[in-house]
Amino acid sequence: MKLLIITPRFPFPIEKGDKLRVYNQIKFLSKHHQITLIALSDQPVEAEDKSELEKYCDQIYIQYLSNSQIFWQVLRGFLSGLPLQVSYFFNRRLKEKIHALILHENPDHIYCQLIRVAEYVRHLPYPKSIDFMDCFSLSTKRRALKSKWFAKWFFQWETKKVEQYERDVFFDFDHHFIISEHDKGAFSFHSKSLIHVVPNGLDHNLFQPIKEITPKFDLVFVGNMGYYPNVQAAIFLVKEILPLLPENVNLMIAGARPDRRVQKLASSRVTISGWLPDIREAYQSGKLFVAPLFEGAGLQNKVLEAMALEVPCIISPVVNNALQAIAGNHVLLGHDAQSFADQINLLLGDQPHRLRLAEKSKEFVYNQYNWNLFNARIHKVIISEYDAFNRKRTKDYAQ
């Protein structure tokens, strides 16, 4: 079966959650289908990054968006009522080019990652699926609650537009996927019951603890440090939680493209490492992984990875909504700065407790999160429709 996948970013290197998800989906689906990838990109794609996807794709088309194009796209989208999540990636001229590529490739099925690229394919007469991944309207709603003045108005406006777009675009696709039951339940339309939940998995071979590494820091937080919810979490961790802890407690913040606000957090107690080639070293550099995330949506891969590497995790209820770990058994929960500080003090002062929590958390993610198991659901949905179509076509010919 010929499967065409369209993505808002080139899926490699993997420094963002959406890239991680679609990369592993492509890797699995290539075992069963002939893959054509159309990927948008607002920056050059290195040859070695493209070669990584060539292992799994028969054809790769990279469609570049310049900064000037993005500016006019956002302005046009704002005036026309498109959500920023969509207008940032949608170019009318590029749509014509992508349609020409699709006609040339003539796929059996189109798989669309995120509403960000739905506008390119939503009206095409092909069998289509969309991976919402997260409920974006939930993320913008949470950001509106935390914002002030103009930003609050903007994110309230964006939330309404995203909610409407998620509802409208739903009916343009035959099948729909989402990362968690919590995100599925956050949609504002009744047809959400038809969405298939496909969580992210974990590379069990890669995320094995490196025995030679010993923690250099008490606390660690890892993620894409240019991503707004991660930036806010880092600021909260340093400004609100750290002052409640003993002065000898230190912290490392690691991740690609740290925002200026994150870089300014560096001090004698706070190390900003930036990107590390082997991300396992970042996780295992800390005795505890702390994720005070109160915004965003979806499943946090960083927590899965930390748990797999036997680093005890203290997380917010927002993070655990998608994770569905048992508080006190697999993770500890912090609801505010003081409760985070209390849980940190508890674990730093009780090594046996840390070891028990680390063991239980690793067992949990290894049993519950498997890429092959989850991505097989996508394959099953797509292939069942394809088989049904072929049976109908055979019956029509016979008649």
Image (cartoon, grey):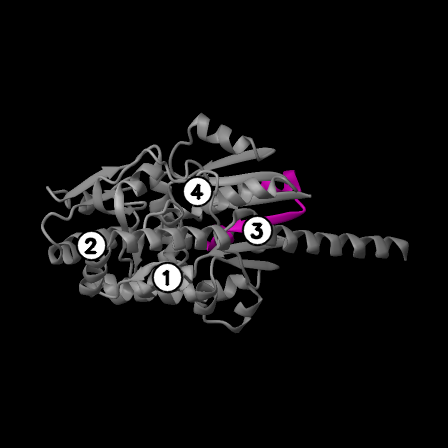
Quadrant for residue 98, please give it.
top right
Q: Mark 1 points at which residue?
A: 329
26 sits left or right of 15 in the view:
right
Please tell me whether mark 3 sits on a helix, a strand or a loop: helix
Label 4 to label 3, Cα distance in Å? 25 Å
Q: Which of 258 and 118 is in front in this view?
A: 258
Q: Which residue is outermost to the bottom? A: 190
Of circles 4 and 1, the one toward us is: 1
* Residue 233 % position (x, y): 25, 54
The numbered mark at residue 28 is none
116 sits left or right of 318 in the view:
right
Three-letter amino acid code of the residue under disc 1:
Asn
Q: Name the residue under label 2.
A: 349
Three-letter amino acid code of the residue under disc 3:
Leu
Q: Which of marks 3 and 2 is nearer the N terminus?
A: 2
Is 228 a magenta residue?
Answer: no
Q: Which of marks 4 and 3 is nearer the N terminus?
A: 4
Is 107 a magenta residue?
Answer: yes
Q: Earlier in the sequence, mark 4 or mark 1?
A: 4
* Residue 356 % position (x, y): 34, 54
Q: Mark 3 points at which residue?
A: 373
Residue range corresponding to the magenta coloring: 99-118
Please tell me whether mark 2 sits on a helix, a strand or a loop: loop
Residue in the picture at 45% in, 68% down:
187
